[in-house]
Amino acid sequence: MSALAGRSRRSLFLYGGALLLAILVGAVLPYTERFVGDNGPYILLGILLAIAVAGAILLQWRLGALLLAAALPFESAIKFGPVASGMKGLGLLTFVSLALALLIDQKLFERFARLWQQPLALAVLAFVLWISASVLWASDKGTALRATVSFLGLLGLVVVISLLERRY
């Protein structure tokens, strides 16, 4: 116990959570094949990985920006149907994390306010608003709505990447 005396409460919480997760995985793993089939351990591993990544993104929105940029070439590989995709989930999680960070961090909020004074950000916003309005008169509303969601995600990606700190 004396070795842990100098540790902060945050690291103890992190280690305790990891230990609890390891115990939970050890208890659930033998029963996954019975309920899910032969792919049970892989499905469990994927779910745990998704939960860990979601928790990390909620704690640090910059990680979400990095994963959005890294996963963009693999967008078609992580689709779960015509509407749901991993990129949309990752983007939504990153934007929620960024919104929470904007509420907490004053410097980040000032950078966010300065962002909307840039002509490029305003042009992309106007383009997304025009596409959103075009759903009203589109002949194929489903296709127009999918394009609107895609361009809204690109606007969010522009905002997230522009809020990253510049380090040279």
Image (spheres, rainbow, N blue to C red):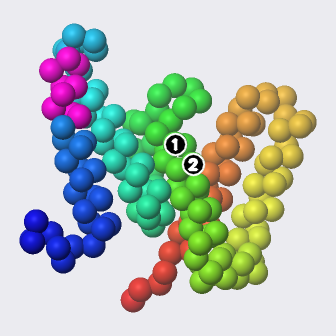
Residue 113 visible in the picture: yes
- Of residue 143 and residue 34, the one placed in the foreground of this image is 34
- Of residue 13 and residue 80, the one placed in the foreground of this image is 13
The answer to if 168 sits in the magenta stretch is no
Q: Which residue is mark 2?
A: 92
Is 118 left, or right, of 47 in this rendering?
right
Residue 6, horizontal then vertical, whole percent = 18, 77
Residue 97, horizontal then vertical, whole percent = 54, 59
The amino acid pointed to by label 2 is: Leu
Residue 108, horizontal then vertical, whole percent = 59, 78
Is 94 left, or right, of 131 in this rendering?
left
Q: Quadrant of the C terminus?
A: bottom left
Q: Residue at x 73, y 36 (%)?
A: 145
> Compared with residue 35, is residue 88 higher up or lower down, i.e. above or below?
below
The amino acid pointed to by label 1 is: Gly
Q: Residue at x 89, y 37 (%)?
A: 136
- The kind of secondary structure element at disc 2 is helix
When asked about the image quadrant of residue 129, the answer is: bottom right
- The kind of secondary structure element at disc 1 is helix
* 10 Å crowding of disc 1: few (<14), some (14-19), many (20+): few
The answer to if 28 sits in the magenta stretch is yes
Is 23 left, or right, of 142 in this rendering?
left
Of helix, strand and loop, which mostly describes the magenta segment?
Answer: helix
Which residue extends farthest front?
A: 1
Residues in magenta, as a range: 24-32
> Compared with residue 141, is residue 16 higher up or lower down, i.e. above or below?
below
Q: Which residue is mark 1?
A: 89
> Compared with residue 156, is residue 47 higher up or lower down, i.e. above or below?
above
Residue 162 visible in the picture: no
